Amino acid sequence: MHGPVAAQDEHSDAATGPGPVAALARILAACNAVIVFFAAIALIAACAILSYSVLGRALFHSPNYWQDEAAVFLLVGATFMSAAYVQGQRGHIGIEAFVGLLSPAVNQIRLWLVDVATLAFCAFFAWKSWTLAYEAWDEGQVSNSMWSPPLAIPYVLMALGMTLLCLQILLQIVIPLGRKARS
């Protein structure tokens, strides 16, 4: 897991002050705080739904045709929508084998290169997610279950979450560059 990079600890407030980058960072941080709250509720709801499903089948032999999909939709939404918050905390899993071997300056360059490569991948993923969401919406795609909820719901959550993740990564790339330009 990425821990805080030593050089970043002292610049935790790098996005404060005037300017469009700082404003975007504040808006994204506020948005992420709200999303994390609702993601936690979604996870609790998914647990409750799945527990109800198991108890309903075991005790009452009642069929479940909506519980699994509802839980999956909630889990997909919570996972993708909270990805930007996790990235903002540098909480995603990463291989840190070289961190102790490299100097802090080289580690900063390594982290920047990883962020650029990650942004490229996530931007592609977000673009494909938006096209998938549009197709699902335009064609009225629904799941193959008896409940048949629209597939646009999880696809939009996935696309929106990946877009927010791209914004978070972009900020993590731009803010250090702005700091270097000012110094």
Image: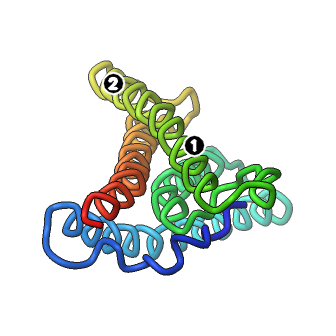
**Which residue is at a point 26% across and 78% down the rendered structure image?**
16
Q: Residues within 10 Å of mark 2 (few under 14, many from 20)?
A: few
- Asked if the residues shown at circle 2 and circle 1 are in contact, with their CB atoms under 8 angstroms apart, the answer is no
> What is the number of the mark on residue 140?
2
Can you say which quadrant of the picture contains the C terminus? bottom left
Percent across and percent down for residue 75 are 59, 54
Amino acid type assigned to the residue bearing label 2 in the image: Gly
Q: Secondary structure at mark 2?
A: loop
Disc 1 element: helix
Name the spot of residue 81 as percent of width and height, x first. 45, 56
**Which tag, 2 or 1, sits closer to the chain's start?**
1
Q: Is residue 11 above or below residue 19?
A: below
The residue closer to the viewer here, 20 or 31, is 20
* Quadrant into which the N terminus falls: bottom right
The residue identified by callout 1 is 114
Q: Is residue 166 above or below residue 87?
A: above
Q: In 3D space, how far apart are the residues under numbered discs 2 and 1 (Cα atoms)?
A: 38 Å
Which amino acid, mark 1?
Val
Q: Nearer the viewer, residue 91 or 22?
A: 22
Is residue 52 shown above or below 109? below
Circle 1 Cα neighbour tier, 10 Å, few/some/many (<14 / 14–19 / ≥20): some
